[in-house]
Amino acid sequence: MVLPPPATSSRVRVALGGSRVWPASGPASSLPGAVALALARSGPLAVGCCVGACASALSAVVVLGSVRRLCVVAAFGPGGAGSCSLSAVGPVAAAVRAGASVAWWAGGGPAVPLSARLARRAAVLGASGAGGLVAFVAVSGSRGLALELAAAARADAPAALAFCLPAATPPAAPRGWVWSPASPALVAALAPALSPAMGVPLPAGVRALMCAPVAVAMPLFSPRNL
């Protein structure tokens, strides 16, 4: 599936996905929304359709009025058709009413089983970020985030940026890619479209990690940049 073109075609789109169990309260709860808002103010942004981090990101962008650059990648259809308990039907509907574009049934139509639809939707989201992927990792071993990261690598995205809660680790790096601690300098060098995300203060304990192709990233993995 090809997403609608960004309204600001001169800027590359960033994709944002995250854990469905991202905390709804506490110091880290507002991080997805703050990052999404910083990215949407800078350029086109694609966001997933599930509860947790994606719902928080959608709500923040809608409330603070940057929806013209927003595209929602939904595994379900209009009116919540084909949705489930993991679907952020309300936040998606609010974004669409506010003027966001949307890719309905991004994982396939209603005849596609839900698990397969969610997996395909994750791949569509990951591949949509020509400027890079931002992920919010609340638990280790997330299949959806692994699919998003793998799709980003196949689509030649420059890098992925992961914000991880203290007890969580990101998915394994795709073949030929490597994780490292993220820094503003490293992000700016590898994936400038992700740079606004590094301007958001991190709550205590949250780690920012970056995943990028080894051949591109290794010359920059120095104490000066990390």
Image: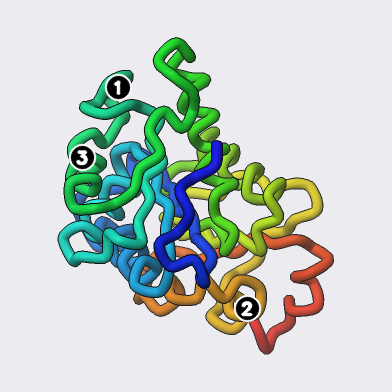
In the image, taking residue 89 as reference, residue 44 lies left or right, namely right
* Amino acid of disc 3: Ala
Q: Closest to the observer: 202 or 188?
A: 188
Q: Residue at x 25, y 62 (%)?
A: 27
Looking at the image, how many numbered discs can be counted on the residues? 3
Disc 3 element: helix
Choose the circle earlier in sequence order: 2 or 3: 3
Neighbor class of circle 1 (other Cα within 10 Å; few <14, some 14-19, many 20+) is few
Q: Residue at x 53, y 28 (%)?
A: 119
Residue lying at the far bottom of the rendered structure: 224
Query: CB under 8 Å between callouts 2 and 3?
Result: no
- Examine the image and state in which quarter residue 62 appears: bottom left
The residue identified by callout 2 is 186
* Amino acid of disc 1: Cys
**Is residue 48 shown to the viewer in this render?**
yes
Query: CB under 8 Å between callouts 1 and 3?
Result: no
Give the spatial CA distance, label 1 vs label 3: 15 Å
184 relative to 33, above or below? below
Choose the circle earlier in sequence order: 1 or 3: 1
Please state the horizontal and vertical placement of residue 142, each as a whole percent of the image.
51, 37
Q: Residue at x 33, y 58 (%)?
A: 32
Give the spatial CA distance, label 2 vs label 3: 36 Å
Q: Nearer the viewer, mark 1 or mark 3?
A: 3
The residue identified by callout 3 is 93
The residue identified by callout 1 is 84
Disc 1 element: loop
Q: Closest to the observer: 153 or 155?
A: 155
Q: Residue at x 49, y 23 (%)?
A: 108
Query: CB under 8 Å between callouts 2 and 1?
Result: no
Neighbor class of circle 3 (other Cα within 10 Å; few <14, some 14-19, many 20+) is some
Disc 2 element: helix
